[in-house]
Image (cartoon, rainbow, N blue to C red):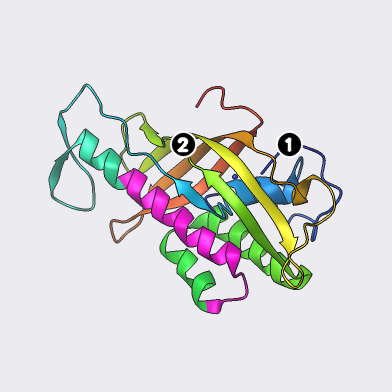
Amino acid sequence: MLTTLTKPRTSQWTPAPNTVSGWRTSGRAVRRYSALLLLPILVACGTARPRADQTTTTIAPTTSTTTVQQVDEIIVARWAAAYNASLAAAKDPGSSALIASLSDYFTGSALTELLQTYSAYVRAGLTSVGTIDLGSPHVVGTPSQTAIVHSCATNKLALVYAATGKPVPGSAGSSTPEPNGVISTMQMSPSGLWMVSSTTFKDGTCAGV
């Protein structure tokens, strides 16, 4: 749950209290969660930025030694894969297989919020359409058991009624482009895979990311 990409404009519609909080419940409620957590359309994804300190590091619980840049690339790849899975689920929230696949990439509050959000989509007969340009995601700091991924995304998502394709009322139904600063926490699982454990968004700005 990536634990979450949506916009800051005031929305006139919400499917249910606290179900779309995460991209968050305030501001462009559904959209914000759609923006990253829902990340319903992964249009572009950069690679990890190269680092000057190409020293080696061992990432537990594995025993292989890799460079810092290689570790960053692995983390960013998992981050992108998580939001590709979220994208697929956002486009078809009624698919039990797609919903189940989210647990391969998300954990903790991020997973919980995504499951709640997609459940709310189904109850309200909604789906997410549009695009998100994820910008150039990169790892900040030196990862150990956790890692932080920053990116400046461009959110062009909108919520529509699945039966008609018509947008929901208010800003949640608008696909007007808007910058979203994204900060995700990745956590190393016991099996050695990086999982998205939480995501926060800066609606309307990428300052600091």
Number of labels in the image equals 2
111 or 123, which lies in front? 123
**Residue 83 part of the magenta segment:** yes
Please identify, in this view, whether the residue under mark 2 or under mark 1 is nearer the observer.
2
Q: Is residue 21 visible?
A: no
Which circle marks residue 149 in the picture? none
Q: Secondary structure at mark 2?
A: loop
Residue under label 2: 135
176 or 66, which lies in front? 176
**Residue 174 part of the magenta segment:** no
* Whole-percent x, y for residue 158 in the image: 69, 52
Q: Secondary structure at mark 1?
A: loop
Residue displayed at 59% across by 45% down: 5
* Whole-percent x, y for residue 128 in the image: 65, 59
Residue displayed at 50% across by 71% down: 98
* Whole-percent x, y for residue 159 in the image: 71, 56
Q: Is residue 61 visible?
A: yes
Q: Is residue 34 left or right of residue 191?
A: right
Q: Are marks 2 and 1 in contact (CB under 8 Å)?
A: no
Q: Quadrant of residue 202?
A: top right
Badge 2 amino acid? Gly
Residue displayed at 29% across by 61% down: 191
Residue under label 1: 8
- Mark 2 vs mark 1: which is more N-terminal? 1
Tell me the magenta residue range: 75-96
Badge 1 amino acid? Pro
150 or 65, which lies in front? 150
